[in-house]
Amino acid sequence: MILEEFLKSKPLYYDKIDYDRFPNIYEKIKHQFKLPIVIHIVGTNGKGSTGRALAHMLHLKGFHVGHYSSPHITKFNERIWLDGKDIDDDILESNHEKLLKLLEKEDIKALSYFEYTTLLALSIFSNKCDYIVLEAGLGGEFDATNVLEKQLSIVTPIGYDHQSFLGSTIKEIATTKLRSVSENLVLAKQYKKEVYELAHKRVEEVNSNLYLAESYLDDEFYDKLNDYIKENNYPYFFKDNFSTAFCAFQLLGFEVNISLLDKLKLYGRCQKISSNVTIDVGHNPMAAAVLLEHFREKKVILVYNSYNDKEYELILEILKPIIKEVNILKIEDTRKVTQSNLEKVLKSNNIPFSVFKKIRKSEEYLVFGSFSVVERFMKKCQ
């Protein structure tokens, strides 16, 4: 079965997660993988841009580098980046065939979408890479990516997300994410002070070191990075993401240089795709808060939809100061919020709304809500 059809048969989400399934299956075939230095990234926001920046810089230094991230926007290949570009279809298919031969039939059936694609990425990166930058899915301690022996952990900002699996408080969410840390830890700037306390506790438990990305490098470098962000019209919060990547880069033994960010491509992260359209794949209150700051001097038409399990009411309250109008973009997903519930929230917040039809050149647009929203928009408007 070709990969695309195979993945369609796999569930993307479970109401209940079997935490033993993937470690047990990986144990059976791990001898087939010869893995290089692994950098593991967990967190709520900023994983993708931080990981891609680090992978990009390592590749520029002449190394073979793989970056595994999720979800994708328009094509699955986006999840597996190798030496500067998304993976080719032929490489995906050949490693899919290889993996199906390695796995037992009952294990092939049991693996989730994310678990299988994690193994697929490892198959591709094995024997090819000097470094792997591996991004966790929704969790940390029990994430499929956490079965690997890692040489460095990166924790990006932690906020509220996936509470049904990770816990209802920041302490619970941060604890399960930080339990993935087993070696030295690079901690990005955090917005919840308890995360710092829990991070210190975790490195003491595993007898490793904690490095704070917001203060590890010298002041002159942070000033140069700030200037670079402004000159290249990046959103301000990218300073923290890039600082985290640079901190990890230096800890790996390399000299930092702002020019290493040149030609970095970040798809879907506060990305301006035309003169009046910005797309962002964020989907939680923390992402909304940074977008509020980025657009603080503008009014935008928000092209939006949400999954029912997301805090869409809070997200819309956060974004209200910059919203001129909401255009509801219809998506096909059983998990989406009903249009009537979404409209009820918009009415209660006195936010004008309509169904999205087309982009008008006279207006500024922000497309936001999830990878699915951005994917649907890109397909509809291209």
Image (tube, rainbow, N blue to C red):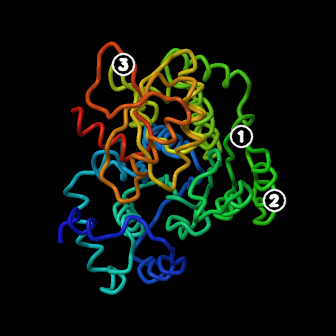
- Mark carried by residue 276: 3
The quarter of the picture where residue 150 lies is bottom right
Residue that appears at 62% across and 46% down: 156
Q: How many marks?
A: 3
Q: Is the N terminus in the top left, top right, bottom left or bottom right quadrant? A: bottom left
**Who's the residue at 40% across and 27% down the image?**
278
Q: Earlier in the sequence, mark 2 or mark 1?
A: 1
Query: Residue 246 location, x and y as percent?
Result: 60, 36
Residue 316, compared with residue 275, is above or below; it is below
Left or right of 39 in this view: 278: left
Q: Residue at x 70, y 21 (%)?
A: 220
Circle 1 Cα neighbour tier, 10 Å, few/some/many (<14 / 14–19 / ≥20)? few
Amino acid on which the number 1 mark rests in the picture = Tyr
- The CA distance from mark 3 to mark 2 is 46 Å
Cα distance between the residues tagged 2 and 1: 18 Å
Q: Which mark is residue 191?
A: 1
54 and 239: which one is in front? 239
State the residue position of label 2. 201
